[in-house]
């Protein structure tokens, strides 16, 4: 299983480059992003080589499925990785990355060490910590725990990032809770500082009390100032705030939270 996952992770850059090339991205841009020469990028991810790599992986996966023999093994976490797409998923992925980066800076650990603790390939760990891939929830819990973090505070943020969101994402109450958690995660990422920016006290009190009501849900200007005061770019939060604002305005004519039932 680990060998198959290694191959799957190796296929990821090749598939991504082919997607970028299909969209018209020049080799020079891909080379800069990969921090290699343009010639190396062309040689490593040419259409022929990428096709061969992907075909070999799918063939091996098919063969493994046909010939596998049921064996009694220890249960393993669900090794599933998704790539965040769309502004809302990418926004939540940025928040996850910010939190895990803060954990790594607080207690420096190597990717090799994390891979050893979680029994995951190093490349899978790197892509997860960089926010390029979102691991399944069991694997995310392992990664955060190995970094000394609190997985329980990330559940809604992970759901947004993975696309495995709540059953009623347009519910005002659900969207408000997602915004609450994202702001709380950023607050923890910054070291949970006491902020005296106008309106910030309301947000901090709501985190401590665990109550994020319609009255305490912030407007965009307060949210923007709060995120800036924490030292982060408010751009990463705006899609989450927009989703709440849309749900709030959409639910206004149908009873707000009552529409969530």
Image (cartoon, rainbow, N blue to C red):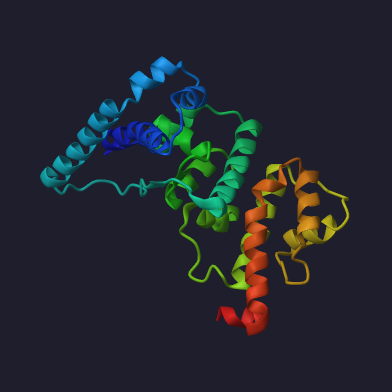
Across and down, in percent, residue 79 comes to: 36, 45
Across and down, in percent, residue 51 comes to: 25, 32
> Which residue is outermost to the front?
24
In the figure, is residue 184 to the left or right of 116? right
Number of callouts: 0
Displayed quadrant of residue 6: top left
Residue 176 visible in the picture: no
| Above or below 60: residue 92 | below
| Above or below 56: residue 28 | above
Residue 175 visible in the picture: yes
Across and down, in percent, residue 228 comes to: 78, 45
| Above or below 220: residue 225 | above
| Above or below 86: residue 145 | above
The quarter in which the N terminus is drawn is top left
The quarter in which the C terminus is drawn is bottom right
Across and down, in percent, residue 249 comes to: 67, 73
Q: Residue at x 57, y 78 (%)?
A: 260
In the figure, is residue 70 to the left or right of 132? left
Residue placed most toward the observer, 69 or 158: 158
> Which residue is outermost to the left?
67
Residue placed most toward the observer, 188 or 16: 16
Displayed quadrant of residue 181: bottom right
Displayed quadrant of residue 123: top left
Q: Which residue is drawn at 60% across and 33% down?
A: 104
Residue placed most toward the observer, 110 or 43: 43
Residue placed most toward the observer, 221 or 180: 221
Q: Which residue is drawn at 11% across and 43% down?
A: 67
């Amino acid at each position: 299983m680990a060998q198959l996952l290694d191959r799957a992770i190796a296929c990821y850059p090749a598939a991504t480059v082919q997607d970028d090339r299909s969209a018209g991205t020049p080799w020079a841009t891909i080379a800069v992003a990969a921090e290699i020469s343009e010639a190396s990028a062309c040689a490593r991810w040419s259409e022929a080589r990428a096709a061969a790599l992907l075909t070999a992986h799918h063939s091996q996966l098919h063969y493994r499925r046909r010939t596998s023999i049921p064996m009694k093994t220890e249960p393993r976490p669900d090794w599933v990785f998704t790539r965040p797409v769309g502004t809302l998923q990418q926004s939540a992925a940025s928040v996850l990355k910010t939190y895990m980066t803060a954990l790594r800076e607080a207690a420096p650990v190597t990717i090799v060490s994390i891979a050893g603790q979680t029994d995951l390939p190093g490349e899978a760990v790197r892509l997860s910590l960089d926010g390029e891939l979102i691991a399944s929830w069991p694997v995310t819990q392992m990664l955060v725990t190995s970094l000394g973090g609190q997985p329980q505070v990330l559940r809604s943020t992970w759901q947004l990032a993975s696309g495995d969101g709540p059953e009623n994402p347009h519910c005002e109450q659900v969207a408000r809770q997602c915004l609450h958690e994202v702001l709380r995660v950023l607050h923890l990422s910054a070291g949970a500082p006491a902020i005296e920016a106008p309106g910030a006290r309301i947000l901090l009190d709501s985190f401590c009390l665990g109550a994020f009501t319609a009255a305490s849900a912030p407007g965009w200007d307060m949210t923007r100032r709060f995120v800036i005061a924490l030292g982060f770019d408010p751009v990463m939060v705006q899609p989450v705030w927009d989703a709440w604002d849309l749900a709030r305005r959409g639910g206004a004519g149908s009873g707000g939270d009552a529409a969530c039932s």
